[in-house]
Image (tube, rainbow, N blue to C red):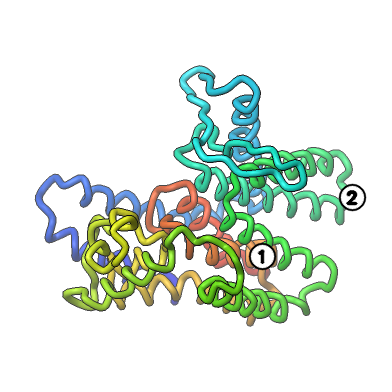
Amino acid sequence: MVYISSYVTLLGIYFYHVNEMSAGSTRASFVVYVALIMGLNLFFIPRYISRNVFLWGVSLVSAFVVTIGLPAYIIGEYELSWLQIKLFNAKFALPLLGTKVHFLQSILSNPNTVGVLAFAGAFGALVLTGEYSRRRQLLLIPVAAMLFLVNGLGLYLTHSRAAWLAFALGSTVYIGYVVFDRQSIPYTVISLGALTILFFVGIFLTIIPIDTHGRFALWTGGFRTILEAPSPLGYGVINTHEAIAPNVPNPNLRGYSPHNSYVEIFLHTGIVGGLAYITIVLGSIFEGIVRKNTVDVPMLGFALAFSINQMFEVYSLFNIAVGSILSSLVFGYLICGYRK
């Protein structure tokens, strides 16, 4: 009931802002169908479609995207029917070898999008491999394991460090559960949350030498813009790139999104909608910790991974991006997946 109330609150604020838009506005129609998709993913689909069907689906889709993207490293960009397989312009150096390769882009818009999909596919395949191994369903183990290897390779080649972190967090929760059973859940999830906070502090203080590509400056600009909102209901469906620009001192960073789903939601829906969103995301994770004896642990780990990944990307649950669809389904399976 808490999550439905939070969803309705979020939806109500978006609809409130729709009244300010002109008749026939594409943004107004966007709010309507995104609200429907989010509601279906959170409260309907997880009740009628098996969690394992979802894990197989995301693993197979991810493996397909990765597999058709790999030949581009050998033959260059190419077309497959109506699909255009591309290589991202930037390169990174392979450890030990020193060879530089392009970030994996495949058919999607950029490597970070592929990274989100590949992390989800790799984690889904890891869970399937573990569960079929425990049940000794020998025919399915090699298939799931192969999907894990393909998606793991794709995840690595995207060089999406946020996706790497998300996969590491989700996998740690799941492996801790496999090794130590359910009693490990509170310790693992809380410890990972604390370590992640320390990790961010280390990066902010330049103790950990990781280039954030200006994300902290963008987040700060976003926070300042949130505080300047005309009401507790935020700015509505606006272009967040333009909204935060006056509060971003570095002119080279102006014109970029806040690169943070939480900042984006608070900009759109204000303090009221932002807290409703936090209730769905962090509230469901906290409930999973409290109800450790009945929670679906793999989906708890999955949700924790997405909650951290959303700090680096703008694919909130209220959107139609690849990450939005996947994360809203994951939180739906977490919310609806408790054992009777």
Q: Which mark is residue 269?
A: none
Give the spatial CA distance, label 1 vs label 2: 26 Å
Kind of residue indicated by mark 2: Arg
On the rendered structure, is 187 left or right of 66?
A: right
**Mark 1 crowd level (few <14, some 14–19, many ≥20, 10 Å Cα):** many
Q: Quadrant of the C terminus?
A: bottom right
Residue 41 lies, in percent from the top left, at: 47, 55
The residue singled out by tag 2 in the image is 136
Total marks in image? 2
**SS assignment at label 2:** loop
State whether residue 184 appears in this view. yes
The residue singled out by tag 1 in the image is 169
Comparing marks 1 and 2, which lies closer to the viewer? 1
* Residue at 23 percent of width and 73 percent of height: 233
Q: Quadrant of the N terminus?
A: bottom left
Q: Quadrant of residue 240?
A: bottom left
State whether residue 39 appears in this view. no
Residue 290 lies, in percent from the top left, at: 63, 82
**Pointer 1 or 2: first along the chain:** 2
Kind of residue indicated by mark 1: Leu
Q: In the rendered view, would you say 164 is above or below 231?
A: above
* Residue at 73 percent of width and 66 percent of height: 172
Q: In the rendered view, would you say 279 is above or below 328?
A: below
Residue 139 lies, in percent from the top left, at: 86, 39
**SS assignment at label 1:** helix
Residue 305 lies, in percent from the top left, at: 60, 63
Report the residue that reaches farthest toward the left.
22
Q: Quadrant of residue 141?
A: top right
On the rendered structure, is 12 left or right of 144?
A: left
Report the residue that reaches farthest toward the front.
98
